Structures are given as structure tokens and as C-alpha cells.
Amino acid sequence: MGDFQESCELILSEVRSALAAVDPAQVEALIEALTSVDQVFVIGVGRVMLSVQAFAKRLCHLGIRAHVVGDITEPAITERDLLVVGSGSGESVVPVAIARVAHRHGARIAHIGSNPESTLAPLTSVFVRVPVQTKLSLRGEIASQQIMSSLFEQALYLLGDAVCLTLARRRNLEPKALWRFHANLE
């Protein structure tokens, strides 16, 4: 029977390996896309949705107009916008369908996932590969001892925070000044 500390060390080790395997050039392309559009929309399902929701919130903290697809306050997407799809396999039905609609409206599509040959591939202008184990068990994926796709969800969450920290540093944003964008109805 494993203990808590052992589980923590396993998770941290796997996340460190996953993030180290992400191509910095792909992240740079994502950063360029995020900073060259009017609005950013995010979509995912399940726990992946939680990770992309956190990413959208952090983008808002940086003064970037970001929205979660499906929220009641979601505005229209246009050709001046970016849809960020979080999907390890790139085959999840809802994100693929949403990406197709966004593509029809002329929006750029960024996919953060593990499968470079997914159904999303022909729709995307930016792909950031987090090469971890997915439900497809593709060649080249980093194996995980965690439950289901936990490693992808964790890496996605931290990748989003790393992208936002990079943006904040490049813009010389003072961490204390960012609190003006934080929710204050709490």
C-alpha cells in the first residue's frame, strides 16, 4: 500500500518529465497567438476543462480578454480571435465540434494535447504537444502510473500558468499590480 508522500513524489516527477518534454518553440507560437488576437476562448471537457478554465482566468489577470466556451456571458467568436482547445487525444467530441464551428467563423485554433495527428490537426494553426499518455496509448507518449489522464490535466494546468508567468515577465507586469484584475466580489 503506497503512502501519501510516495504518491506526491511520483506526481511531481511525472509532471516535471512531461513539462520538460514540451517544445519551447511550440509554446512561443502559442504565446504569439495569444498576444495577437482580440479575444481568447477555451474549451475542454471533464478535468481538462478545469485546467483550461484556470488558464482563461489567469489570462484575464493579465488583461487579456478570455472566455470559457459555454459560459452564459460568452460573446461571439470572430476571425480576430483564438480558440484554445485542451484535449489530450484531440478526439473528444465536444471540443472537436466547437473547433469546427470556430474554424468556420475564421478564428484561429490552438490545440494543446498529446496527439499531433488528431482530428483537430487540420483545423489548428498552433499545436503544443504535451507528450503524455492518453486514452489512445499512442507511440511516443510518456507513460504514467497515475489514474487515467491525470498527468495530462496536471501538465496542462501548469503549462497554462507557465505561459502566463512568461507573458507577465515579458510585459514587466508587477505581480502586485495584477490584483486589479482579480475578482473582488468575494
Image (cartoon, helix red, strand yellow):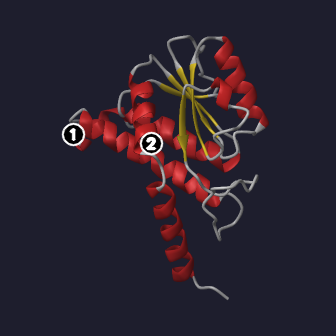
User: Front-most of 41 and 159?
Assistant: 159
Mark 2 or mark 1: name the one nearer the start of the chain: 1
Q: As drawn, which residue projects farthest toward the right?
A: 93
Residue 113 visible in image = yes
* 141 lies left or right of 67: right
User: Front-most of 84 and 114?
Assistant: 114
> What element does badge 2 sit on?
loop
**Residue at horizontal 54 percent and vertical 69 percent from the top:** 11
**Residue at horizontal 44 percent and vertical 16 percent from the top:** 38
Residue 163 location (% of width, % of height): 40, 41
| Residues at marks 2 and 1 touching, judged by CB atoms closer than 8 Å | no
Up-down: is 166 above or below 133? above
Residue 45 location (% of width, % of height): 70, 41
The residue labelled by disc 2 is 186
Which image quadrant is residue 171 in?
top left
Which image quadrant is residue 93 in?
top right
Mark 1 Cα shell of 10 Å, populated few (<14), some (14-19), many (≥20): few
The residue labelled by disc 1 is 174
Q: Amino acid at mark 1?
A: Glu
* 83 lies left or right of 173: right
> What element does badge 1 sit on?
loop
**Quadrant location of the N terminus?**
bottom right
Q: Amino acid at mark 2?
A: Glu
Alpha carbon of mark 2 to alpha carbon of mark 1: how far?
A: 23 Å
Picture disc at residue 153:
none
